[in-house]
Image: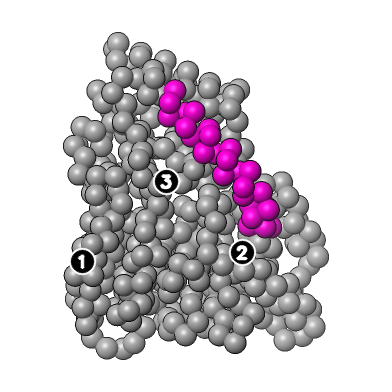
Amino acid sequence: MDHIYLDHNATTPTRPEVVEAMARCFAAGLANPASQHQPGQRARRVLEDARQRIAELLGAAVNCPQPDQLIFTSGGTEANNLAIFGLARRDASAPGQIVVSAIEHASVLEPAERLMEEGWRLDTLGVDSLGVVRPERFASLLGPATRLVSVMLGNHETGVVQPVAELAVVCNAQGVPLHTDAVAVAGKLPIEFRRLGVAALSVAAHKFQGPLGIGALVVGHGTPIRPMLFGGPQQGGVRPGTESVALAIGMQTALELWHREQDEHLRQMTALRERFEQGIKAGYSGAVVHGESAPRLPNTSSIAFPGLEGQILLLALDMAGVACSVGSACASGSTELSPTLRAMGLSNDLVASSLRFSLGVTTTAAEIDEAVRRILHVCQALRGA
């Protein structure tokens, strides 16, 4: 056992079945799915079948008189950007208001801040000490000028699941579209787009053992959305550019496999996460599991090691063969303390001593036990130093 990988929220290893499915697709020599000739039409059928199946697996309605839409993107960041800019700017009227939670990923926060620079009003929905948004304060933030709300389904750092369906009821009553970033949730918990009641939902294939380079934005029927890119009729002109049939097949295959095995994986990851946290708390006095008593993703554990510097601990653990993170991979290298943990009202010392550990379906009990042993050994050595 060389390196123990506990950073599955950053990316997951691509399943061999996914690689094989994509290889078959490449070997078939499919044409451009936008071409009108017969080879192009064959490619189009394969692509649209994959699109329909992915949408179904995410709980969207496709075979009905009022179908939802699934737009392929390059990943979660593009899907979130398309949702924020495309939904907020869905009409040509003057800038309005956008509401986001305080714990959003940078790919939601930064587009929202960009709108603020253009004259939009940006309001933030806070969270409690467990990292759960405050629904009781939500309705008061909405008004006639509200164009969009974005609240993530599950946090990428703490794993805390948000009451998105409850917020969607309020938004729908006021005619405000609600987008949810479900990138951290896909492949960890079942997703039911229509049951959530949201207007749009983002996912990324590499978070559930699919290929890098493809994600999707699911958009509810009748929800207008403006494109960010121009230059082609693909995907209704909302996201022009030649679609990759092989990537779509890889994403479909990964999601199919997760859907088939989800019950087993949920039990396995939950049990291993609890085993991991119990081991750390038993061996490190004062360790704090953030959001421990809130509903969480089964694979995610954010732990503070009071008395130690998180960045130093991260590097020491890497040398000891344990891969984890200080937060989102998209914020790697930033010296800023975690916005998510700060929004929870935690002290700077507690935030600065925190690391994120995220398990995957390939994680084993032996790896968990060895990881706990290595982590405690490194902590002891750092404390002694």
Image coordinates of residue 61 in percent, x first then y, are 58, 75
Which element type, helix, strand or loop, lies under badge 3?
Answer: loop
| Front position among marks 1 and 2 | 2
- Is 198 or 45 nearer to us in this picture? 198
Crowdedness of circle 3 by 10 Å Cα count: few (<14), some, many (20+)? many
Q: Is residue 73 visible?
A: no
Query: Is the image coloured rainbow, by chain, by secondary structure, or in one colour?
Result: one colour
Question: Which residue is more in the foreground, 5 or 132?
Answer: 132
Upstream in the sequence, badge 3 or badge 1? 1
Query: Eyeballing the image, is 4 above or below 328?
Result: above
State which region is magenta. 253-279
Q: Position of residue 339 (x, y in %)?
A: 26, 48
Mark 2 = which residue? Answer: 57
Q: Note whether 49 is above or below 77 in the view shown.
A: below
Residue 170's x, y, as percent? 31, 72
Q: Which residue is mark 1?
A: 123
> Residue at 76% of width from left, 62% of height from top?
25
282 vs 69, left or right, is: left
Quarter of the picture containing the C terminus is top left
Which residue is rendered at x = 75% and y = 52% of the image?
A: 20
| Spatial separation of the CA atoms under disc 1 and disc 2 | 33 Å
Question: Residue 100 location in percent, x, y?
Answer: 28, 64
Q: Which structural element holds mark 2?
A: helix
> Residue 150 vs residue 216: left or right?
left
Mark 3 or mark 2: whose residue is earlier in sequence = 2
Asked if the stretch drawn in magenta spans residue 270, the answer is yes
Residue with the mark numbered 3: 296
| Picture residue at 23% right of the left edge, 56% below the top | 126
